[in-house]
């Protein structure tokens, strides 16, 4: 499914337990790789949230496809604890294919920054899930004139700069946040979840077939937990994703209409299969 949200074009595939991959062609970035859907191999950077198979199964295929198309080796980032096992998988496929290793695999920790372009970078944060997981917030960093100099003539500002004074200050804007598979607690533990312009938030469970308590034990979010915290979302767009296949589209739409307030529903995109 193709989405336009907050200035991003997103090619999105996300079904709970099946496959999750978001392609952001403007940045050349994939968020998780799923089973490596079409087009993913064109993105040169892959940010993996965790090593559950529905998020990471396509890693070796992605690396291999990049090689076949003659593209530079991708940069792949993953939680540091998943690095040894994912390296082993990539090396095993290299051996099987009599190939050379064509991937720069880097383990990351919460707090790390990954450069994505001139002004764009990804910030890594911890995401609470069943296994070691990190989320990524894609940010922009721009320099603007210090507000206290706004009324000063250009020539005077130039003089200050020539004399070595720092006349600009840095503005960091969280543009898009993706916590991966997560618990609702991430709304409190990571500020950019609720302040980024675009939020890709999993909502795996609805209704009473799986209770919010069971959703938590499984490391996921239930719609009731989002409803209870609806006032916290300051995002321009909230994309709800990763729906379990046990629900029909109509059930999900009815739950959203019933449980979420209009002020949040107006900013909501529901990511359905296909
Ligand atoms: Zn998972």
Image (spheres, grey):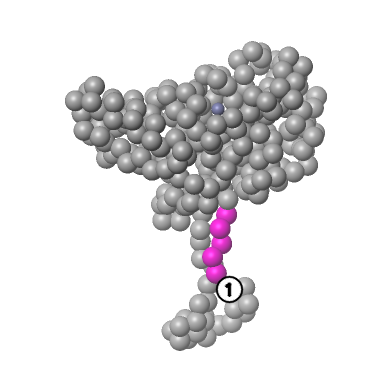
- In percent of width and height, residue 40 lies at 39, 30
Image-quadrant location for residue 237: top right
Q: Is residue 97 above or below residue 229?
A: above
- Left or right: residue 242 versus residue 267 is left
Q: Residue at x 56, y 46 (%)?
A: 125
Q: Residue at x 47, y 23 (%)?
A: 53
Assign a secondary structure to mark 1: loop
Most frequent secondary structure within the magenta stretch:
strand
Residue occupied by mark 1: 146
Residue 171 highlighted magenta (yes or no): yes
State the residue in front, 272 or 33.
33
- Left or right: residue 201 versus residue 76 is right
State the residue in front, 35 or 91.
91
Q: Residue at x 60, y 15 (%)?
A: 245
Image-quadrant location for residue 236: top right
Residue 31 highlighted magenta (yes or no): no
- Left or right: residue 96 versus residue 159 is left
Q: Is residue 172 above or below residue 154?
A: above
State the residue in front, 70 or 224.
224
- In percent of width and height, residue 94 lies at 25, 28
Q: Is residue 189 above or below residue 155?
A: above
Q: Quadrant of ligand 1?
A: top right
Residue 24 visible, this angle: no
The total number of labels drawn is 1
Question: Which range is magenta?
Answer: 169-173
- In percent of width and height, residue 205 lies at 68, 22
- In percent of width and height, residue 111 lies at 53, 52
Residue 156 visible, this angle: yes
């Amino acid at each position: 499914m193709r989405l336009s949200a907050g200035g991003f074009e997103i090619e999105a595939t996300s079904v709970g337990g099946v496959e999750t991959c978001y392609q952001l062609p403007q940045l050349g970035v994939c968020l998780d790789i799923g089973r490596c859907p079409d087009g993913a191999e064109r993105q040169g950077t892959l940010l993996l949230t965790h090593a559950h198979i529905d998020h990471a199964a396509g890693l070796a295929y992605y690396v291999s496809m990049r090689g076949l198309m003659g593209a530079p080796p991708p940069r792949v980032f993953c939680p540091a604890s998943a690095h040894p096992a994912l390296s082993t998988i990539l090396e095993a496929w290299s051996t099987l294919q009599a190939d050379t290793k064509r991937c720069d695999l880097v383990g990351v920790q919460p707090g790390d920054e990954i450069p994505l372009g001139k002004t764009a970078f990804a910030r890594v944060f911890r995401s609470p899930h069943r296994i070691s997981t990190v989320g990524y917030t894609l940010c922009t960093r721009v320099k603007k004139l210090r507000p206290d100099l706004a009324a000063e003539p250009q020539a005077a500002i130039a003089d200050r700069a020539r004399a070595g004074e720092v006349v600009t200050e840095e503005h960091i804007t969280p543009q898009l946040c993706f916590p991966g598979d997560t618990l609702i607690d991430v709304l409190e533990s990571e500020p950019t979840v609720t302040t980024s312009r675009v939020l890709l938030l999993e909502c795996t469970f609805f209704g009473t077939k799986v209770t919010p308590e069971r959703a938590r034990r499984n490391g996921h979010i239930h719609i009731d937990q989002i409803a209870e915290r609806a006032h916290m979302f300051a995002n321009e767009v909230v994309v709800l994703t990763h729906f379990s296949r046990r629900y029909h589209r109509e059930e999900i739409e009815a739950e959203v209409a019933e449980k979420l307030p209009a002020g949040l529903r107006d900013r909501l995109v529901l990511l359905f299969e296909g």
